[in-house]
Image (tube, coloured by chain):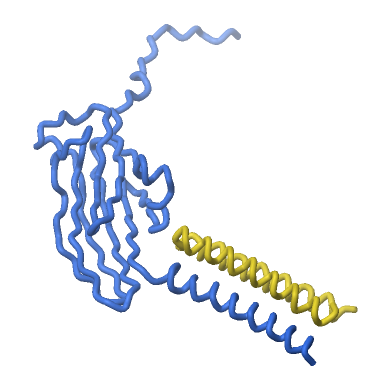
Chain colours: A yellow, B blue
Amino acid sequence: MRIYILYGFGILLCVSGVGYLAAEYIKYLSEPGKLACLGLATAMFALFGKYFDERGW
Amino acid sequence: MVAKNRANLYLYLALICFAGILAIFVVDGYLGIYDTAYVTVGEREQKIEAYSWQEPWVKEQGYGIGTSWVEAVFFKYEIDNRTLATYEADVEASVWKSGVKIMQLLDENVSVPPFKVVTLDWRLQAEDLEETGIVAGESGEYTVRITLGELERKIVVSYYAPVSGYPEKIPPQSVPVPEPVR
């Protein structure tokens, strides 16, 4: 149980770190760049969803 | 087997999307020409970041700073070339009032090597403005326009008239001090 809490904590830190870096970097992006990133992020989450769906999670 | 391959295909496509996001961050976000201005009035330095110029109100109205006539305004303009080629451009800084150019502060051709930073300095002081016929001491706004190639940046310098301080201290009238009662 404790190991899962540690995993959860680690994942949370990773996600928040990536989120922070993305928020910092996005300031320097042009409008088309932001739009492309949004599209790619949406596609990425959709494909991850499909992947886990196919794996039966 | 087919289902597993399809699942892996989704995973690879998702990873390609992630790589695409990172590529956009690097190419669109990091690479390019970045200009940062530092404006110092008195002891305070204000940094105008490269992305600040894109803010709608800065784009339309210019970045505002306030100063008094006795303080010179020091400008430091950094051009950061984050491209693989040498960047060459004309840099011009001038003072404008009501759409009329009043004076030139800087006119230089800069050449910035790849992944290097070049800094330009100039200053704006009341004496220089007075030479153009402006009466110092009155409140007024002046626009410092910085052009870098085809880019134009605006910094609005607001001069404020000296505020009268507290009234002069009136010396107390001397009155005889009564003797203490015993």
Q: Is residue A9 left or right of residue B46?
A: right
* Picture coordinates of residue B78, whole percent (x, y): 29, 62
* Relative depth, front residue between B65 and B113: B113
Vertical relation: A35 (above or below) A52: above
Place residue B138 in its image quadrant.
top left
Give the tally of numbered discs: 0
Vertical relation: A19 (above or below) B14: above
Q: In this view, does B95 lie to the left or right of B172?
A: left
* Relative depth, front residue between B101 and B73: B101
* Picture coordinates of residue B33, whole percent (x, y): 33, 66
Vertical relation: B150 (above or below) A11: above
Residue at the spot 36% in from the left edge and 52% down from the top edge:
B45
* Picture coordinates of residue B3, whole percent (x, y): 79, 86
Residue at the spot 27% in from the left edge and 77% down from the top edge:
B85
* Relative depth, front residue between B162 and B79: B79
Instruction: Name the image quarter holding the N terminus of chain B.
Output: bottom right
Q: Is residue A19 left or right of residue B92?
A: right
Q: Is residue A21 left or right of residue A31?
A: right
Place residue B118 in its image quadrant.
bottom left
Residue at the spot 43% in from the left edge and 49% down from the top edge:
B55
Place residue A13 in its image quadrant.
bottom right
**Residue extending furthest right?**
A1
Instruction: Name the image quarter holding the C terminus of chain B.
Output: top right
* Relative depth, front residue between B11 and B108: B11
